[in-house]
Image: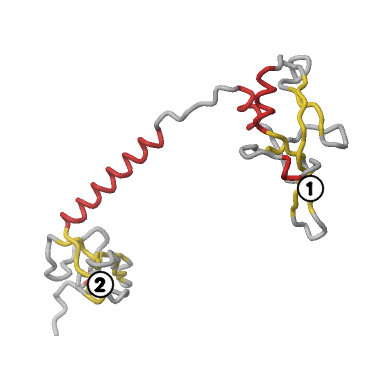
Amino acid sequence: MTTDKKTLADAKPGGRVRLGDQRSDLVPGIVRCAKCSFQLHRTNLYLQSGTVGAGDSKTEPCPNGCGPLWPVTWETWAREGWAEAERLHLENAALAARQPVASNQVVEDIEQLPFDTSAQPSANYGALAVDGARQPVGEPITVEAVATVRRNGDGDRYIDWLTEGGIADLEVGDVLIVSDRGITDEDGSGEVYAAPPGGTE
């Protein structure tokens, strides 16, 4: 027995050890099913040297039972990578396209209002936006609350309708918002300012 042959145990970090005669046109350690596109990445961990290397590209049955796992060529790997890069580029371009901007400043201001999940009144969003657009800065606008969110004894939330007909009083297309502004009357109506009175808070 001779000890002059190099083995994986003799490999130094950063060095190369020939792992057998593998085809150079195959991506090492990657096999894929041609029918279901299941892909397996094989990695070998060399315990004595503490290094990791690509596994072999031997065929084996697909775990889904539809055929064998075949080695992937570098050409296929590169073409798929290019197609994925193009898809991501187009997706990013679509996301970066200019989005429509709301023209009504009151709508934008309403969307920025803080709120919590405790019992707060809701209002007709469309009416509030229209009324707010007509009001001078600092002038109150009247908001009619149609529902209050409450919690029962179990902690579950429910809606307490404040309108006489309940949900029947609402029209299709009405949007309800939660407002943290004070509601002064028992029937749910109160004043919300388009801007703080006196110009500043």
Q: Tell me where residue 16 appears, x and y as whole percent.
A: 19, 62
Helix, strand or loop at mark 2: helix
- Name which residue type carries label 2: Ala
Task: Give the camera-side residue of 38 and 172.
Answer: 172
Q: Nearer the viewer, mark 1 or mark 2?
A: 1
Tell me what residue is drawn at x 69 percent, y 22 percent.
132
Give the number of the disc on residue 129. Answer: none
Quadrant containing the C terminus is: top right
Q: Tell me where residue 88 appears, x and y as whole percent.
A: 33, 43
Is residue 194 toward the left or the right of residue 189 in the image? left
Q: CA distance from mark 1 to mark 2?
A: 74 Å
Q: From this viewpoint, which residue is outermost toward the bottom?
A: 1
Helix, strand or loop at mark 1: strand
Is disc 2 surrounded by few (<14), some (14 to 19) or many (20+) residues within 10 Å?
few
Q: Tell me where residue 176 appears, x and y as whole percent.
A: 68, 38
Colouring rule applied to residues: secondary structure
The residue wearing badge 2 is: 9
Tell me what residue is drawn at x 68 percent, y 17 percent.
134
